[in-house]
Image (tube, rainbow, N blue to C red):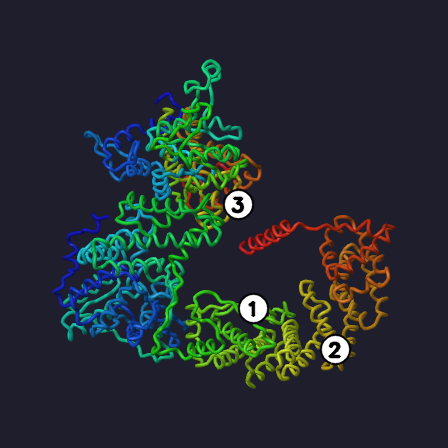
Amino acid sequence: MERFLCNEKISEIIPFDYSSPVLFFPIRHHSPACSYHLLQAIQNYQPDCILVEGPQNAEKFIPVLTDENTVLPVAFYYFYRDSGKYVSEDAEDYKCYYPFLATSPEYNALCFAVRNDIDCRFIDLPYGEILIHTAENKGLRKISEQQNYNDDRYLSENQFFKSLCEKTGMRSFEEFWENFFEIDALFEDTKTFVEKMYTYCYLTRQNTSDDERENDGCHIREKFMAENISKAMETHKRVLVVTGGFHSYGLYQLISSAKKPKKVKLHKFDEKTQNVYAIAYSFESADALNGYASGMQNPYFYDRVWENIKANTANQEKMDNAYKDTVLELLLQCAKKSTKENLLITMADISSAVTMYEGLALLRNKKSAGLYELYDSVQSCFIKGEVNASSDMPLKILRMIATGDKFGKLCENAERVPLITDFENTARKLRLKIESVTEQEIELDIFSKKTHMETSRFFYRMNFLETGFAVRKKGADILNNSDRSRIREVWSYVRTVHTDSALIDYSVYGSGIEEVCRIVLNKKIGKETDCGIASKLYVESFLMGIAVTDKFSQKLEDILINDGNFFSVGKALYYFNLLRSLQKMYRVEKTVTEIFLVRCFQKIMMMLPSMINVKPEYSDECIKICRMLYNLVSTDLLHEEYENLFTTFHTMIQNDNPEPALYGAVLGLLYGSDVTYRQTINHAFNGYLTGTDDKKKQGAVFIRGLFSTARDIVLVGDEFIRITDSLIKSLAMEEFMEVLPELRLAFSYFAPAETDSIAEKVALLYHQKPSDIQKSFTVDNELYLSGMQLEKEICQFLEDL
Amino acid sequence: MENFIRPPMEIRYAKELQVLKETDTARKPENWYLSPKAVRSFILGTKKPIDFHGEKVEIKKKFFGNDALVERCIITLTGSRGLMLVGEPGTAKTMLSELLSAAISGTSTNTVQGTAGTTEDMIKYSWNYALLLAKGPVKEALVPSPLYVGMTRGIITRFEEITRTPAEIQDSLISVMSDKVLNIPELENDGLIFAKSGFNIIGTANIRDKGVNEMSSALKRRFNFETVNPVKDVRLEKQIILNEVEQNALSDKIEMPIDTNVAELLAVTYHELREGISDTGIKIDKPSAVMSTAEAVSVFYQTISNAWYYDETALNLADLTQNLVNAVCKDTKDDLEKLKGYFNTVVKYKADKVGGIWKDFYATRKYLK
């Protein structure tokens, strides 16, 4: 390693000279070692201007970032809407984060500058310009990296580093970096450290092709940064340039070249097209492993290292404590947390782990144990048995601790996004704990407490805006028609970085949550043609407590008129019927719901007769709609349609080739209003029974449909039992096995007591006592649970296929 | 050495051990043959040959795939806890424990082989009954077990397949592991055997075989566990196959050339069958048989032995396929169908697209029966 890094010529390639008018300081984002040496370099160089790599249009947020009352982590959130199609013909929206932690060298440089009245600026291209100059699926336009403003990929995704890792026996770039740049740096002077950085970054750059840099937008960014450096050098005597190490050589070349590069022209974008906001950020999001790669992993670990470095700066001899203390601190935290999770971690385990990480550091010739020795020691000493998904809890706990759960906070005078302010104000009014980084749970008695209803609506609004802020854990699921009898709701909520960024994305539509939801509702329905989905939006507006506009109602009506799909109108009928039944409970005034409900009913009635020949896979949905119609005509609102519906049903059963399940269901509904239809049912069933083999099989489908609407037909007398018995007896074993699932489904409509009553009748039919055939046993709880688990795993397996 | 079918590590690598011992300047725990750093070099190899009295001695890498695991094993053995290597069959757990023992204690043969019939006296000590009857319970009449030897000499005791041993027998290790004392009540005042520095236990346990006994929590607490996984990197697997086959051929004086293409073909085949997916993304059914690197070595070695003893000039791929069938289709006939499936999809695809040895390999599919 040293052979590579102590290249004697590096000082000739990029000199690091405190007497130079410009000093290039190479960094890696969130690196404590870089922060430490950068502050040393600032003390030695005494710059009168500090230039930092970062999109220029974020400069207005430097005072917010460096304010003493701002709690890190915070991030700059950039967005660019490519409505002018400068990036691509797809006119997409783009966004990215630029996070700052206490360990960030850029943050420490800016703080120093602000507190010492030194001119400081960001020098990179605005975000939109970077995108415009980046090739598709490269650099910031890479799908996996669309959210990151960073150059770490140059350092860590390079063939050079891969062979270096192999040669040095390191498992990953992160381990390599920690060993050679973080730990070693604490025992080196700043010049040695910077030259080592220069060497590594220079070699990395040499291993990155010109085309690659061009496609990543690297060249034009460096030209723009060089332009800004030159400008600063005109007015300042000592300019410190803090950039990703990869750019140092490129910038140095451009600045020292006699030929000045062509000026970079910028597009003029308004604030709606391109803007930047400062937002509170979290360690979890800053962790490179969580997909927001922008620097080093495990931020809490390095945050603690940085605190310990600062504590020991005065005493160089104790500098190795920075890592020693941190590793021990996290090991103890891991042991404590593991014990809380009922994993037995003894003092002997802890002591063994300490021996392990210290021994490993010695064996690996490291000056101190670091994060990777800590992970090794936990794996070796805390996990008793094979390491697998069920036993690696201590490692998961350590990972969680090393990532950290801190959430940042902007200072009071920070310019805020109005929508976020409204979110915060509403949350405060509703007494929600949005400052907490851990998930909160709240039980809402929505029908007896006004604030609880408001809170529920607030959660629905936040979910509508895709913020991921709240999850309903218990309570009526109106949209999916389940648990409707529940009158309380249990929600969990937590504010994350995603909450803020989603609100920022929607901030173009307005400054209040309610206003934005209303606009988004109108926008969504404007694009809709399916009246099932449109009516679902109507339900969502109801749950959010947002009265729909006339424009919305008009559009909904238009969709209803033009939609000729039986099933989507059926879905709309379901939603409107549901809302009608909920209005009283939710104490909502009568709205246009009933008008829409009647219109849906009428439209379905027109289409219903032709549905009798529906494909078997759609018969269940049809039956549901028929039952809904049947229930609706018994209400005051649609009582007048009673005759009309039964005439339609009667027309349907006259069809020569009806779908058997729907045929049975419609006959069942007719029997519900007129028992004389029993004869027709018996006749139809006999028809199946005496028909061809295929017809016999359809008999099972017929009774499934019939039982779904008129199961009492079996319970009255024993005639139906006899016919069903005849059907079963007439089937050969193979045919019986074929129709068995249908028969099982058919009898699943009965309640347990009804099933017992049927069983009694069957027993009597065969001259048995009911007790002779009733064989019930209690299923072992564990067996049941393992069966459930097995089913879940099978379903998951099938989904993954 | 030439008469041994399988020489122990300290004999097989005697030269390397000697060179490392004589050039070892690092700190070492009491009674260790080599320092931890030299143990690491012995198992993971050195980047450059060591200059030894004018001779350049190469220290080869002997364990592939997880250097950090080896380092953790070494550090575990410097402490008071035992080392338990767990993992699927054929992942070189035994080889690693032998290498560690040879480098740390200079011997890898002080071993207890765990079976369902292992008894406590096989682990601790037993008696020479003739002497016992003649002289009573004296040390002379005692038959020392590997554990006893390890404690009295301060060397590593290897306990192979510990989980095959009944749990109550395994538990007889608890007091030895905790107090480093073996109590022999029959010897009365002389009955306490204290372990000398350098003593420790390396256990191995399979996680996939049938008939294993779960270890008690009390015993588990006396060990650090290391999970040895199959090698994930095809390049490394190929290297292991080449190294092992070369070594075996050398011991058996088989002078057949070792074809690196065949080693690569076997490494890829085993890797893909183990993972259930080919490098081109074709999904395949995994056989239920253990698809370990050790099995791949065995298939390759059998094939070259066949060629050598039947006077063939080069390795025959048809033999290789037949040996592969024998290795894969042990437990169930389904595995043969899975192997056929692999040939009809992945091997066929590679025969078309890559050609060369894959084409020849595909041509041997008639032997899949």
Residue that mark 3 sits on = B285
Asked which quadrant contains residue A23, the reply is: bottom left
- Dot 1 falls on a residue whose secondary structure is strand
Q: Please, which chain is the residue tagged with disc 1 on?
A: A
As measured in the structure, the alpha-carbon distance from the residue carrying label 2 to the one carrying label 1 is 35 Å
User: Relative to residue A732, is residue A334 drawn left or right?
Assistant: left
> Dot 2 surroundings within 10 Å: few (below 14), some, or many (20 or more)?
some
Amino acid, disc 3: Asp
Q: Would you place residue A407 above or below residue A352 in this image?
A: below
- Dot 3 falls on a residue whose secondary structure is loop
User: Relative to residue B67, is residue A795 drawn left or right?
Assistant: right
Residue that mark 1 sits on = A490
- Whether callout 2 and callout 1 share a subunit is answered yes
Q: Is residue B310 visible?
A: no
Q: Return the residue found at the far right.
A: A767
Residue that mark 2 sits on = A633
